[in-house]
Image (cartoon, helix red, strand yellow):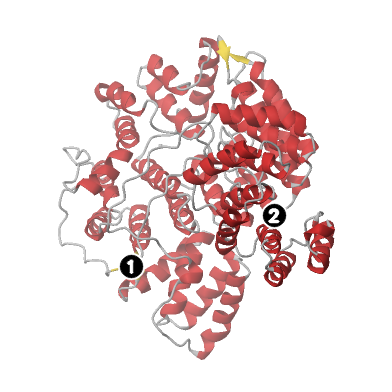
Amino acid sequence: MGVAVLALGLCGVPVSLWAQAASPAPEAGAEERPGIGPETGAATGAGDAPADGAQGEADGVGEAAPPAIPAPETLAVETSPAEITPPETVPVPLAEDAYVRARLAEGDRDLPEAARFFGDALANDPAGLSAAQRGYRYAVLAGDKALALNAAKRLDAAGQLTRDGTVLLLVDALERRQWLEMLSRTDRLEAELNLAFLSPYLRSWLSLLRKDKDFIAPQMPTQKQIAALVERYQPEQTLLLALARQDRDGLETALAGVRGGVMFGPEQRALMAAHIDRMGRRDLALAFLVQGVTATAEEASTRLSRARKLYRKRPVTPQYGIAILLNRLAQDLKGQGDGIVAFSIARMASFVDSANEDIRVNLAHAALLARYPDISITEAAKVPATSVDYPDAQMVLARALIAQENFAAAEQVAQGLIAQAGKAPQAEALAGVEIRRGWRLLGDVRAQANDYPGAAEAYQMAMSVGTISVGNEPAENSQEDPSLLLQLGASLEQAGKWDAARPMLERVVELAPDSAMALNHLGYALADRKEDLPRAINLLEKANRISPDEAAYNDSLGWAYYRAGNIGKALPLLQRAVEMEPSHSELNDHLGDVLWAAGRRFEARYAWMAALVALDEDDERTPALRQQLERKRESGPEAQ
């Protein structure tokens, strides 16, 4: 099968979220009442997951994903802008032109233009719920907070505001320092259930904002499913609250709670370390700053000095804590549906703290996963080279450029990362980790550009960085990193160097025996060459047991059966693969071959015609593939 980039979210844990509209906001009471954290792979073989621009190790290879969030039964999936079906309304004449222009921009996936024209339509037709529904979503995604609030308030009055709209109204109350209104919005979130797990922390932050005499600590809800979600955010939020309150007594306990369980952003980790040091616990600050990484005392001290210089004077405020809470939720939502929910919440986090570079990187990544690479590029490019988030921002930028097939610019970004990391002092051996990331990124760029020899060269350079030491141990054993070995082996295979590729692919299966991707790649490569077919079939059968609903894995196993002469087993698998991905050229091509072998030649020609129609006109291999498919339609696969 075709080639794809191995991809995994930065730290995505899917969780379902709201669909139905919320009820209008309750009126605020007459008096206040207390209440109240490495990279994609490269070329793969048949059946590997499609590229999504995400960072991380290869799916199913390397580190295990975080545990899934147990979602309450009340949660449902939010619709994307294109799927919204608002109540039937007819735009007034003055709004019709703007509405049509907005829908055209929507079709072109031009967020700023769509938001602008929906805003014009809403201005000319204040009662138009259709413009308000679409205008709200596009305004949020485009970062037009004023328009988003305008549309949200109109929808709220009509009882049509989606659940995340309550978050936006709360963010607005926070910005205007309207604590009573913020409390009312928090009560509403809790009553609506979908995002009730945020309310214990919102109430605690509000307690600090109001300067309550007695601080209100986060309270665990009685509902088990909501409580499970509250617990997920507890370690990070407890630590942030301790830092905000300068709680020296609770600091050590709070730090113990986050060990190994929270993936902090570079800026957040540095800022928190600076404040821990400021509270007189330099020992804890040093340990926290290099947590999870083997570093010398000198390296840790150097990093802490930089963190103090950058962030010592930047306070841990309630606004910061709430922004981090929303940002963490957005990270957890990555991988759900079309990515619009995660993108929306990430944007709202940026509304709360627009200067936070961790949030900006997450926003850029969420935009990329939602298939808005232009927005991703805009946001990632805002992170300055002096920021601790710059390497991560450049990784996302490169992947957005890959999504736009601007491979030359993406390669330039990767080369820049390698050069920048190489300029670090030799004592900063941790720079080797960044050099390795740069080489892997360069390999990804070249693999996506179908430059497999160049990709293999880059991945080989990434493996060589494994000899750099951090402290008294290797930074990472690159020679035994299964995802990197898979990237290198896949690139060598695609470059026609099967003898060099096979040992690496075999080693990946040894290191990650339950990786469907690794099993599929080796199994397909063997089957396609008619080498060791019994073993190839065993590998592919196991891959399908692990991921039975992956179209490409069904195709690979079906193809292996076909190569072994078992048409009866091959045909249903290939038919199922095409049912799942009817516009995939290679799947249709394989199906045509098997149908022909089964004597169903009329249907085989239709399958090859579907393969022809689905060819990617921008792929340099398309002319040769078209000729092959046309010869098959004329004379069958025997002509090949």
Q: In terms of secondary structure, where does tag 1 sit?
A: loop
Q: Position of residue 513 (x, y in %)?
A: 52, 32
For residue 559, above or below residue 66: below
Q: Amino acid at mark 2?
A: Gln
Q: Amino acid at mark 1?
A: Gln
Q: Residue at x 41, y 43 (%)?
A: 328
Give the side of residue 92 with respect to residue 445, left or right.
left
Label 1 sits on residue: 20
Q: Position of residue 412 (x, y in %)?
A: 76, 40
- Residue 207 is marked as none
Q: Residue at x 48, y 89 (%)?
A: 92
Whether residue 423 appears in this view of the structure is no
Packing grade of label 2 (10 A; few <14, some 14-19, many >=20) is: few
For residue 186, above or below residue 515: below
Residue sitting nearer the eye, 403 or 375: 403
Measure the C-alpha gap from mark 1 to mark 2.
34 Å
- Image quarter where the C terminus lies is bottom right
Give the side of residue 140 with respect to residue 519, left or right.
left
Whether residue 112 appears in this view of the structure is yes
Q: Position of residue 631 (x, y in %)?
A: 83, 64
Packing grade of label 1 (10 A; few <14, some 14-19, many >=20) is: some
Label 2 sits on residue: 404
Q: Position of residue 481 (x, y in %)?
A: 59, 26
For residue 89, above or below residue 372: below
Q: In terms of secondary structure, where does tag 2 sit?
A: loop
Q: Residue at x 48, y 24 (%)?
A: 308
Residue 237 sits in quarter: top left
CB contact under 8 Å: marks 1 and 2:
no
Mark 1 and mark 2 lie on one chain; the one further toward the N terminus is 1
